[in-house]
Image (cartoon, helix red, strand yellow):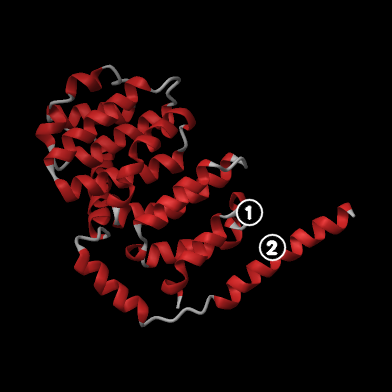
Amino acid sequence: MFHTRLDEIIQIAFENQGEHLMVMFLLFTTIAKAHPEIFTSNQIDFILNSIKTWSNSFNQKQFVYQMLLPIANAQPELFVVHQNEFLEQIKTEQNRDLFQCFQTYLIALTILHGETKVNEYLNLLIDLLKTTKNLSNDLSTQIFHTCQLIGLRNKQLLASKRNDFIAYESNTTCRMLIDIIDGNKLSEENQAAINRTMEEVTQIEQRIVRNERDIQHVTKVVKRQELNVSIFLRFIRIFSILTNLSCLSFFC
């Protein structure tokens, strides 16, 4: 039963510079999407602290952010202690997958905590725009889209940031934000984009774990669902041993 082996799955996936990450990617992602509620703060801390030490390719971390996204949606509170680290990484790496994970985390928290977080995170996103060196068009567009996701349900707070957005109105997504604030009539294309944005927020809201009782309920359900991963995990361990032996024999 995979819920009892989750620590072992994570350990194998992220040990030794993540050498087994790609082999474990599908299994981990399947669990994260189906049952993000069963992950704990210790497990998220272990994953994020592990990749800090990785010296391998930049692309491998992108897969980690993809794996974490459904967990950030369901349990955003698990990522709060890593928020500042995320921000610094976004500024230096401008990684799309990292920002999408961060975006989902922000929106989920604003849904859970309301206006206080909305104002805080709009200010955070505006500060990110102002302080990121060599800001790419892709990242700035993502930031403005996140402001839409956060602000469409809180238009008064969004309107209070209008002066900050004016400096970036050459960006199409930012221009749409300003039009929303000003109450301007949107083109059919832009209105369709806003409708998709609202639907995106609704989907994020539906995936959030609201309280401990929800987690307990899901855990009971998961315990009734058997997924035999013991053989798979054993295979990975054996594969690792054989690979190491092969390397040793090559140098002998």
Q: Position of residue 191 (x, y in %)?
A: 23, 40
> In the rendered view, does 141 fall on the left or right side of 19?
left
Q: Give the quadrant of the N terminus.
A: bottom left
Residue at the outermost left position: 156
Instruction: Look at mark 1 in the image and give the residue it sits on.
Output: 19
Q: Position of residue 163 (x, y in %)?
A: 19, 19
> In the rendered view, does 106 fall on the left or right side of 89?
left
Proximity of marks 2 and 1: CB atoms separated by less than 8 Å:
yes
Mark 1 residue type? Glu
Q: Nearer the viewer, residue 30 or 246?
A: 246
Q: Quadrant of residue 205?
A: bottom left
Q: Residue at x 30, y 36 (%)?
A: 145
Q: Residue at x 23, y 47 (%)?
A: 109
Instruction: Look at mark 2 in the image and give the residue it sits on.
Output: 240
Where 175 sits versus 217, above or below? above
Q: Quadrant of residue 40?
A: bottom left
Q: Give the quadrant of the C terminus.
A: bottom right
Q: CA distance from mark 2 to mark 1?
A: 9 Å
Residue at the outermost top position: 167
> In the rendered view, does 246 fall on the left or right side of 164?
right
Chain-order first, disc 2 or disc 1: 1
Q: Is residue 184 visible?
A: no
> Looking at the rendered structure, which numbered label has been put on residue 32?
none
Q: Residue at x 30, y 32 (%)?
A: 144
